Image (cartoon, rainbow, N blue to C red):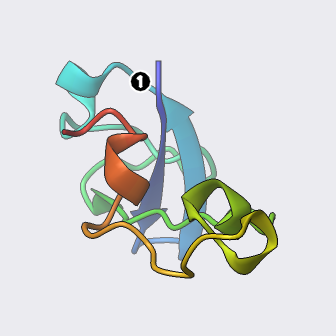
């Protein structure tokens, strides 16, 4: 099950909730104040650390330094 981030505009608290994808947009109660009227799901960002260029034909492996087209590293995220 994915973890989603929510923001409560009543108490200005950001919190996470483990929920199924089907219930991600359903109302959730704020973890801090208990309110549910002004809680919205937020966009979550993340980053990874690592060179990764070698796996795409980087200069260390003797290939060109071009990256694959598309926003998800050539489909490795499972979206394609």
Q: Name the residue nearer the viewer: 9 or 42.
A: 42
Between 23 and 64, the one lying in front of the other is: 64
Image coordinates of residue 19 in percent, x first then y, are 41, 24
Name the side, left or right, on which 19 lies relative to 32.
left
Kind of element beneath mark 1 = loop
Dot 1, how many residues are within 10 Å of its Cα: few (below 14), some (14-19), or many (20+)? some
The answer to which of 43 and 66 lies nearer the viewer is: 66
Residue sitting at 25 percent across and 66 percent down? 70
In the image, residue 1 sits, relative to residue 25, either above or below, namely above
Q: What residue is drawn where x is 42% and y is 40%?
A: 76
- Residue at (40%, 50%) from the top-left corner? 35
Q: Is residue 63 left or right of residue 4?
A: right
Measuring 40% from the left and 40% from the top, which residue is drawn there? 77
| Left or right of residue 23: residue 20 | right
Quick check: 65 above or below 63?
A: below
Relative image position of residue 20 (x, y in whole percent): 34, 19
**Residue 8 falls in image quadrant:** bottom left
Q: Which residue is mark 1?
A: 19
């Amino acid at each position: 099950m994915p973890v989603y981030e929510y923001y409560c505009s009543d108490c200005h608290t950001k919190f996470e909730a483990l929920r199924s994808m089907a219930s991600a947009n359903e109302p959730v109660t704020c973890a801090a104040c208990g309110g549910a009227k002004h809680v919205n799901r937020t966009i979550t960002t993340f980053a990874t650390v690592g060179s990764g260029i070698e796996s795409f034909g980087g200069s260390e492996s003797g290939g060109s330094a071009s990256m694959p087209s598309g926003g998800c590293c050539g489909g490795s995220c499972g979206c394609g």
